[in-house]
Image (spheres, grey):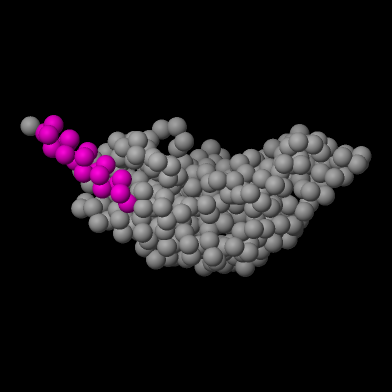
Amino acid sequence: MPRAYLDHASASVLRPSAQAAMIPFLAANPGDPGRLHAEGRTTRVAVEQAREQVAACFGARPREVVFTATGPEAVNTAIWGAVERARADGDRAHLVTTAVEQSAVLEACARTGLAVTVVGVDGLGRCAAASVVEALQPDTALVSVQLANHEVGTVQTAVPEIVAAARAHGVLVHVDASAAAGHVPVDFGALGADLCSVDGASWGAPRGAAALLVRRGLRLPPFVVGGAQERARRAGLEDVPAIVGFGAAAAEVAEALPTEAAAARSLTDLVTAAATAVPGVVRYGDPEVRLPHLVCLGIAGVEAEPVLLGLDQRGVAVHSGSSCSSELLEPSPVLAAMGVDAERSLRVSVGWSSTRSDVEQFAVAFPEVVGRLRALRNEESP
């Protein structure tokens, strides 16, 4: 039986268009884009074309795109740069974020040593604009808020209001669109934010390339130093194959997003229907205003790890626990912040290559696995 891969929110299948763009720079064309010889000029043209493709996909100007290696690096670049800028001014020593941000945001804020106000959320994982605005202080340097949640899929509809209020107070705003990019429209210009992090691993771009969008005219000290690459905003020889693959994937998504999002929503609706038909299974997050490609499920009566392993034995790959942890099955801080069971959750996510048969395989295996585990638990009970 073929395997059903339903963990695209962690890492998706590389798009053929991205692979095709990458191959010439993996097999040949080794030139450093910073060099003046023909090989260098060839790779420079490729990098700048990718920059234009990424900018067009996310409503930015090409010069606002700073390539990074990963989404977390983009997040750290934004937060560290904003804090260092504030320290140079000398009068801002406070950050605001929310309790459901990805770990890169929360840990980057914590390591600055500045005071951090973490704003709570409701039972669907939504932050209220009023709560964020109330957290602003005269010395607030940065507000960092997600565009959509990486674990339960809730889209933060308050972001435009938060951005407008923070900007009115003279506070920089970072929007983490890592989970939203490639799945719902992201328009950096329309958002009005100062900084926006995007990643492509969940929608078929290669691993090894992501981007921080930096508002035109904003100057931040670089997080990675030691070279003048990316217009002195991120040091290090560019990973040309990954960047051109990122650009090609972004160009495809810019055109295919409405169709792909509709297909993804249809598949995750089927996942939800099949899973919640099992007694004691609930869906977390906003059921309507959500990312189309993922579903977070709570399962009463059994631990998540054996459910994950049971599904894996039946050829179905899903994710469990904190979605930012790649090594450990840890309780989810996102679900804890929402006030729901953080110990027993599965995240099922589809991608551009997913098919109905993948979901049907899950729909057959899931109730069997949960039922078997519950029966075993009952047998072991005195």
Q: Which quarter of the rendered picture does the N terminus lie within?
A: top left
The residue under the point 78% across, 51% down is 48
The residue under the point 22% across, 38% down is 373
Q: x%, y% of residue 355?
A: 46, 54
- The residue closer to the viewer here, 204 or 93, is 204
Question: Magenta span has 116?
Answer: no
Q: Is residue 182 visible?
A: yes
- The residue closer to the viewer here, 202 or 188, is 202
Q: Is residue 327 left or right of residue 365?
A: right
- The residue closer to the viewer here, 74 or 356, is 356
Q: x%, y% of residue 47?
A: 77, 48
Which residues, given as a range, are shown in magenta?
363-381
The residue under the point 53% across, 46% down is 12
The residue under the point 62% across, 44% down is 206
Q: Is residue 382 left or right of residue 93?
A: left
- The residue closer to the viewer here, 211 or 165, is 211
Q: Residue furthest right?
A: 37
Q: Is residue 55 left or right of residue 256?
A: right
**Does residue 216 lie above or below 369 as drawn?**
below
